[in-house]
Image (cartoon, coloured by chain):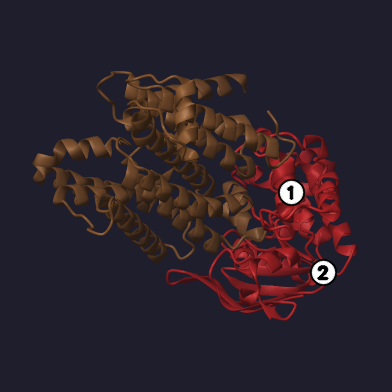
Chain colours: A red, B brown
Amino acid sequence: MLEIENLTVSYGDRNVVDGVSFSVRPGQWLMIVGPNGAGKSTVINAVSQNTCFTGTVRLNGTDIRKIRQQDFARRVGVLTQNHFVGYPFTVEEIVRMGRYAYTPGIFSKENGDDKELVERALELTGIAPLRKQSVLTLSGGELQRTFLAQIFAQNPSLLILDEPTNHLDLIYQQQVFDLIRNWIHEGPRAVMSVVHDLSLARAYGTEALLLDQGRIDAYGNIDEVLSPENLKNVYGMDVYAWMQKMLAQWDDQEEVLPVRLKQA
Amino acid sequence: MKRDTESFHPWEYVLFALAVLGMLIVCVCVGSVNIPLKETATIIWDAVWKLPMPEGVSDSIVLSVRLPRVICVALVGASLSLCGGAMQGLLKNPLADGSTLGVSSGASLGAVIAIAFGITVPSLPFAGTMVMAMLFAFLSLIIILSLAYKLDFSLSTNTIILIGVIYSMFVSSILSLIITFASDKVKHITFWTMGSLQGTSYENALVLLVSLAVFGSVILSKAKELNAFAVGEDVARNIGVDVRRVKFLILICVSALIGVCVSIGGTIGFVGLVTPHIIRLIVGPNHRRLLPASLFAGAIFLMVADLVARILLNPLELPIGVVTSFIGSIVFVYIFYRSRKAA
């Protein structure tokens, strides 16, 4: 589905992503993980053509730079990390924009399929009751779900998500991730996402790409990549032990304070 | 506030057109000499069907002075307002209009050079200022986009706005320099920079009409893309908009329209900024409604401003730019205050 070879992104003289190669196949959910500055979002930006890059990115065998933007949008849905909407569009208007690639001209009208996909996207993300509300009045989580609905309305076969649970509380984190996992199984579909929460990555991902300073530290099956040794190597701390202690505080009332605070 | 359908019904367009026509007739009737509505209608009717005219001065006032001027005013208002609406969507900035891009300033420079140095084109009756304004509008666009492209390959809106503002400042310093050296034409230049459609002709109206029909149609046809730009350039790209091509196309059309308007009416501020802003509060941000509504509202707004400019200190005529800024800012503050209070 998606093949990336020797992807390099440079800002000035510095390579923020340096010779990265990986692939995403139908049925896979690739989690891109790594510490701040590892180049996770830059990989996403390059693959979604929002930044210049060298190397090759192929979608179903075709170089993405040779694919028309409309055709690309029909196959790939991209959710960016932050949304700054300045005008009072309604939730429904934002979601309907997701059908642009299918009805681009001023005279092309939405057909039954377009309307049905918009309705389904609104229902799936739980924002149907807010459809007439201005996006300027939404909370961060509601806005995130609105843009998630927009890319569902695009009906792509590959989702590229940069921190999809940004601004979402726990219940919506679980709902959104369950939703995406079910979505993958509905067809020959795949997801590539940047996730900071390693527990979420491990719970839902099938593959992982562990980045460190723009380079691949480990890539492959999620359980193998997110091993305590690999994470310790990249994050410079015992991630596994930290998570164990964080979890333990819920069982053992004497371990209430977070580890770092206790050490201080 | 209607937000259920994305575009207007045909009957709504008919209503807008009738409103523009009604205001046009009122503006032709009223002036230093008031001409009754029936007489005005008869004169226009007879002229359209080439019937014999009644004897009198009214027909020359209506046909030779007021009608071409009011048609030009309506077309300039419609064009500037449409351009403002498009720029505010494209640059995702409610304070954007033609002047933000620096094209208005560039067109002004061309026209002022023509006035100051007496540049004319022999074969065209209304050339000189117009040709220079259009030429400088295009040159400005090329300079601004080239600089923006050099700095930022993706032609991001922030880069374009920044270079547009810097370019406008640069141009205004050259304008001041020209005015300093062309002291004998200061009055003419100053009056022109404040905007005036006095003495405009049917030829001017035809140029404006053709420009609006050609460039305005392209802008109107990009309403869906402008909706996407108004949400964000990255969103526009992600849903399938060919961002660079569409942006380039809209910028060219906006520059051409502004160049033509500035060459005929001088620098008329506030129409492109205020009208789309007010209309957005009424019909919402969807450009499929916002752009056509701004077009009609811009025509009406500028006709009212021109009428006020003609009759307020009669027989003295005010520059239209003074009136648009005065009325526009008061109306803008009132509506903005009310909408914020209601929210």
Q: Are marks 1 and 2 on the same chain?
A: yes
Residue B178 located left or right of residue A117? left
> Of circles 1 and 2, which is in front?
1
Report whether A166 appears left or right of A45: right
Q: Amino acid at mark 1?
A: Arg
Residue to which mark 2 is pinned: A28
Residue A257 visible in the current orientation = no
Q: Is residue B245 left or right of residue B261?
A: right
Disc 2 element: loop
Label drawn at residue A96: 1
Q: Would residue B20 be found to the left or right of residue A13 on screen?
A: right
Chain of the residue on which disc 2 is drawn = A
Q: Return the residue nearer the eye: B21 or A195.
A: B21
Q: Residue furthest front?
A: B52
Q: Amino acid at mark 2?
A: Gln
Q: What percent of the width, then of the height, locates residue A176? A: 81, 50
Q: Which mark is residue A23?
A: none
Which residue: 36% across, 22% down?
A: B31
Quadrant of the frame with the N terminus of chain A? bottom right
Q: Position of residue A97 (x, y in %)?
A: 70, 51
Classify B165 as above or below B323. Answer: below
Residue B233 falls in image quadrant: bottom right
Q: Residue at x 58, y 37 (%)?
A: B293
Cα gap from disc 1 to disc 2, whole angstroms: 27 Å
Instruction: Name above or below for residue A7 compared with residue A161.
Output: below
Crowding near the residue tagged with mark 1, few <14, some 14–19, many ≥20 C-alpha atoms within 10 Å: many
**Residue at image location 66% in from the left, 34% down from the top:** B12
Is B66 rendered above or below residue B256? above
Query: Which secondary structure lies at badge 1?
Result: helix
